[in-house]
Amino acid sequence: MAEHGAHLTTASASDDRPSIFEVVAQDSLMSAVRPALQHVAMVLAESNPSRYGFLWHWFDEIYTLLDLLLQQHFLSRCSASFSENFYGLKRITLGDSKGLQQLASAGLPKTQHWKSLLLLVLIPYLKTKLEKLVSSLREEDEYSIHPPSSSWKRFYRAFLAAYPFVNMAWEGWFLTHQLCYILNKAQHHSPLLSLADVRLVRLTVEDIQALEEKLAVATGNQQPPRR
């Protein structure tokens, strides 16, 4: 659990609200992992298409499956996503005003757990697929053999015209939450946390001790209880 120690602060137990820098940093962690793995898949596919070509062809689905398993593991054991746990944070239910009612090692209630898992994994997958669809339609619009008056071409041209505004509204939704969080007017820096009925707080000393004990039991290295 050494990663937790690097991110602990001297804040009091009542000051459990992470800073905007902490929450944005943990958001950026997973967004940096995906391009790195995608580059590895591309290199492998180019070096040996017959053996590794499927990695590139089905990268989005393979990555989403691995992400699902990773987030399920950390939500179950640490009440946090992988990146949140890395930065010493945990998720608590909105009714848990001080973040002290349940240790991180106990996991989230079932409803918040499945909402969190769905939003962590499904939203990035759908967003990636939508961006690829838009890119594909733009290329088709440039080199399309469809007649200009075809209903399909009118439809996807309208879709392409509307997409920048939809994307701007999406990004603005997140930016608004971040600004409200900075001004201490909101409990969430992300609307996805609000939809999951959770908020982020810092891990306490008790959380870290419980997580270390749980890890020791899982690895068979349990130590005698401290006196």
Image (cartoon, helix red, strand yellow):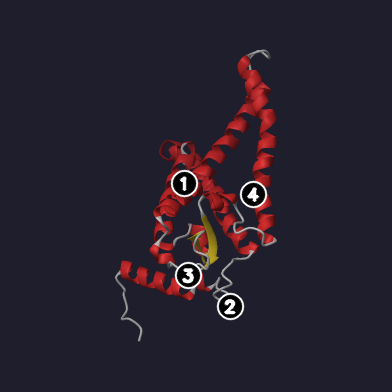
Q: Estimate the x, y position of residue 206 in percent, counting from the top left.
A: 44, 74
Tell which tag, 1 or 3, sits nearer the viewer.
Answer: 3
Tell which tag, 3 or 2, sits nearer the viewer.
Answer: 3
Question: What is the CA distance from the residue labelled 4 to the residue labelled 2?
Answer: 29 Å
Under circle 1, the secondary element is helix
Residue pointed to by mark 4: 174
Residue 118's tag is 1
Residue at the (68%, 61%) spot, across then down: 182
Which numbered disc, 4 or 1, marks the residue that appears first in the sequence?
A: 1
Residue pointed to by mark 2: 10
Q: Estimate the x, y position of residue 218 in percent, counting from the top left.
A: 32, 66
Which numbered disc, 1 or 3, marks the residue that appears first in the sequence?
A: 3
114 over 100 or under it: above or below? above
Question: What is the CA distance from the residue labelled 1 to the residue labelled 2?
Answer: 33 Å
Tell which tag, 4 or 3, sits nearer the viewer.
Answer: 3
Q: In which quarter of the image is residue 141?
A: top right
Residue 100's tag is 3
Under circle 4, the secondary element is helix
The amino acid pointed to by label 1 is Leu
Question: Quick check: marks 4 and 3 in contact, CB under 8 Å?
Answer: no
Which numbered disc, 4 or 3, marks the residue that appears first in the sequence?
A: 3
